[in-house]
Image (cartoon, grey):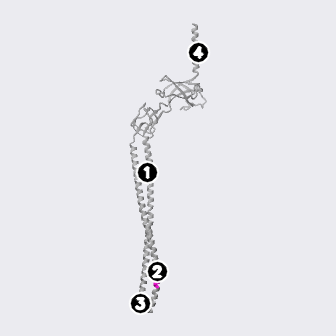
Amino acid sequence: MKKIILAIIILITVGFGVFMYEKNKYVSSEAVFVATDSLTNLAFKIDGKIEKMTKLAGDKVKKGELLAKLQTNILNTKLKEIDYKIKAQNHTINTLKLNKQKLKNELDIRQNIVKNNILEMDKKLNALDFQIKANKVKLEKLKFDKNKFYKLYKSKKISYDKYQTISTEYRYLQNMIFAQKENYKVLKISKNNLLQNLNIIKNNYKQLDVLDEQIKSIKNQIESLKEIKKDIVIKLNDSNLIAPFSGIIAKKFVNKDMVIKKGTFIYSLVNPKDIYIKVLLSEKKLSPVKIGSKAVVTLDALHNKIDGVVEKIMPVSASTFSLVPRDIASGEFTKLDQRFIVKIKIPYNKNIRIGMSGEVKIYKDEK
């Protein structure tokens, strides 16, 4: 009997020793939760009425898939109006350009005609001026001959008919010079009229600048309309709620036909593959835990053990960002065991759900 009791004591002692040895190889915590950093609340960037919702809580979604849509009747109508205005303004610009080109062609033709007429007028004036000067020289000679013949007639050396002939020729040339001078004046007036007409044509070229300003102004209006259109297109795109990544709908916040404000949560989306184990570990146990340390997680809902690796150790305690931090300014201080968040990476398992709890063993020596 004594031997049996002794054997039992030895077994208990050895078992306890093995238990304490094994326990000394790891640190443990029951403050264990399944967490994720990919839990994302999705919302529209604009106000509107929900026209369509395609998913329910628990549904799987693919990246780029349509989740919800707002009514866009007003936006579509505005977009059509803007497109019509842009087309109308472009038509106006084309019309102005055609009018400008037509006016320029007309002014160029008129200007060339007037310039040619002025050149012709200058030629006529120069030729007439030359004729007048030549006739004046000729008139001076006739005047001399006339006086000479008059003296010869008086001395009865020539007949009156001969004197009358040269006298008539003299008066005829006088009248011709007078007529040429008058014609010269008329031509000069005509040239001045042509020059005035040329100035008017040059001033009319300023209408081309006016047309250019009108075209520039309309182009600026078109650019403003394009900016408005761009804003409408952005709003139309924002009226579709698209899945930013593949995952599962964690929660549906609203229903179809509801009028919502921008920023209102529509869905909560989570990536089930982007999960980890969040451990709140006592500061007394933190020292032997290193990044890369092996961990074994047991979730209450699954019972089976899951191998993991310490991926990150937060640099501050979990209470640091508490909404009601401890006030130690008064000098009254109660020492509390602080806990630090340790992030453990685990392989994907479709049965693991965010929020599950359990316990963990983090081994000290293995990495």
Q: Secondary structure at mark 2?
A: helix
The tag earlier along the polypeptide, 2 or 3, is 2
Q: Amino acid at mark 4?
A: Val
Q: Main secondary structure of the magenta part?
A: helix
Q: Amino acid at mark 2?
A: Lys
Image quarter in which the C terminus is found:
top right
Q: Which residues are magenta?
A: 135-143
Crowd class of label 1 (few under 14; some 14 to 19; many from 20; radius 10 Å): some
| Disc assigned to residue 14 | 4
Disc nearest the viewer among 4 and 2? 2
| Residue at image location 46% in from the left, 81% down from the top | 138
Q: Marks 1/2: CA distance? A: 71 Å
Residue on which the image places disc 3: 160
Question: Image quarter for residue 198?
Answer: bottom left
The tag earlier along the polypeptide, 3 or 1, is 3
Question: Image quarter for residue 237?
Answer: top left
Q: Amino acid at mark 1?
A: Ile
Q: Marks 4/2: CA distance? A: 155 Å
**Vertically, is 220 above or below 312?**
below
The tag earlier along the polypeptide, 3 or 4, is 4
Crowd class of label 4 (few under 14; some 14 to 19; many from 20; radius 10 Å): few
Residue on which the image places disc 2: 136
Q: Marks 3/1: CA distance? A: 93 Å
The tag earlier along the polypeptide, 4 or 2, is 4
Q: Secondary structure at mark 1?
A: helix
Q: Position of residue 332 (x, y in %)?
A: 60, 28
Instruction: Say which of 193 and 225 sits in front.
Output: 193
| Disc assigned to residue 222 | 1
Q: Position of residue 341 (x, y in %)?
A: 55, 29
Q: Is residue 10 left or right of residue 124?
A: right
Q: Secondary structure at mark 4?
A: helix
